[in-house]
Every structure is written in structure tokens, then in C-alpha cells.
Amino acid sequence: MMFYEGMLYIIDRSNNLLGINVGEDNDNGKLRVSRIERLLDGAPCGFKYFRGCLSYFDSYLVESHGALLLVRREIFYIRDNDMIGATKPAVGIEFEVSQSDFQSRSWVKVSSVGDDQALFISKGSSRFVDVSRYKLNGNCIYFLDDGSCDWFWKDAPSSCAVYDMRDGNCFFIPLPTVRSKDVKMLAAWLFPQS
């Protein structure tokens, strides 16, 4: 979900983009929903299938140069048949990025976000950033341990990973994972003011 240009946008389970108009009630001054509309149909899924694997999906909304991007992450894993609910380490991860096309009411897949641009995604906050001045790799998706896939991050050397859109490689970057009295503290992005 994100608030952009006066409207609240939400992605549903089918990756349909919903627009919610929120206004102030003239009688009592409280906020109220005045309209909910499906603006874009869900993007078709183009992820690979690995035999014997299950997958976990997440979707994120990001604004980029006046357009909305749908970033979808899929993590493949093998279910451990010896223990109910247990999983073995991830065997693959993929991302797909699609851009909103309000004329056709659909999502259009993009293969690059730009050599000097990167996406920083998490459940709490996602942003499109010009990374050339920060000496970071462009055309990448930086993502955090946001608590949604504990089995993926369990033995990870860091709470941050990078997916390179050029070649599909994923690697961890050296940010510390914070733990306090056996309680895991989730990482969060901190962005400079524009």
C-alpha cells in the first residue's frame, strides 16, 4: 500500500491495483472512504517453476518518475518432508518489475530500472533511488529481512540482500543483523531527505 498524489493505492492478492479515494466528512471532519476502484488488472506471473519446490510471493509498490512500479519477489524452497511445516534453505529467488499503464489498465513488464537507479524494498517502506551519488550498484533491487520469510534469512550472513536485474544473481551485503535477548529486530531503510 502507498499514498501517492492524493490517492491511496493498494495491491490485492491477485496484484490488481486498487485506488482508494479518502476524503474528509463535512459533518464531523473525520476521514472517510469515498470510492474504491480497480485501476489495473493483475500482472501475469512469469516466474519459473522448479520441480519439487514451493514458493513464497511478496508484492511491493514503488513510485518511480511519476509511474507506479509493481515489484514481485518469489523465493523458491524445498519443503522438508521429515518435519511438518519445516523448510530447507532457499534454492532460488527472482524478482519481476512491472510499470503501471493506466491507458491499457494493465502492468507492463520492465527488464531494467536504469544503470544509475535502484529499488529499495521492504514491507515498511519502498523507494526508487538515484544511486550514482552513493557509489552503489544500479539496476538492482535491495531488499531487507522484513519478517516475512524467516526460513530464508535464518542462516543469512546479513539482513540485507541485493538482486541484480542484469543477470538475476542475488547476494548478501554486509549489514549486521541485530538481535536482542533472542528477539529478532527487523531491519528498516533510512532515506535522506530529498
Image: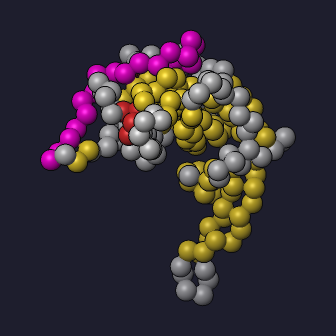
Q: Which residues lie in the magenta part?
A: 163-181
Q: Residue 69 appears at what percent x and percent y?
A: 63, 37
Count of residue discs:
0
Farthest-out residue, bottom: 27
Farthest-out residue, front: 82
Identity of the residue drawn at 44% across and 44% down: 84
Identity of the residue drawn at 63% across and 29% down: 96
Identity of the residue drawn at 68% across and 57% down: 19
Quick check: is 164 in the magenta stretch?
Answer: yes
Instruction: Specify the color scheme.
Output: secondary structure
User: Of residues 93 and 83, which is closer to you in this image?
Assistant: 83
The answer to whether residue 137 of the structure is visible from this angle is yes
Up-down relation of residue 163 to residue 43 (above or below): above
Farthest-out residue, top: 167
Q: Is residue 19 left or right of residue 114?
A: right
Farthest-out residue, left: 181
In terms of secondary structure, what is the magenta stretch mainly? loop
User: Of residues 87 and 60, which is closer to you in this image?
Assistant: 87
Up-down relation of residue 38 to residue 100 (above or below): below
Quick check: is 90 in the magenta stretch?
Answer: no
Q: Residue 95 appears at what percent x and percent y?
A: 58, 28
Identity of the residue drawn at 50% across and 15% down: 169
User: Of residues 145 and 122, which is closer to you in this image?
Assistant: 145
Q: Residue 126 appears at what percent x and percent y?
A: 48, 40
The answer to whether residue 102 of the structure is visible from this angle is no
**Quadrant of the rendering where the C terminus is positioned:** top left
Q: Is residue 173 left or right of residue 116?
A: left
Q: Residue 86 appears at what percent x and percent y?
A: 42, 39
Q: Is residue 85 left or right of residue 104?
A: left
Dividing the picture into quarters, in which one does residue 174 lie?
top left
Up-down relation of residue 99 to residue 21 (above or below): above
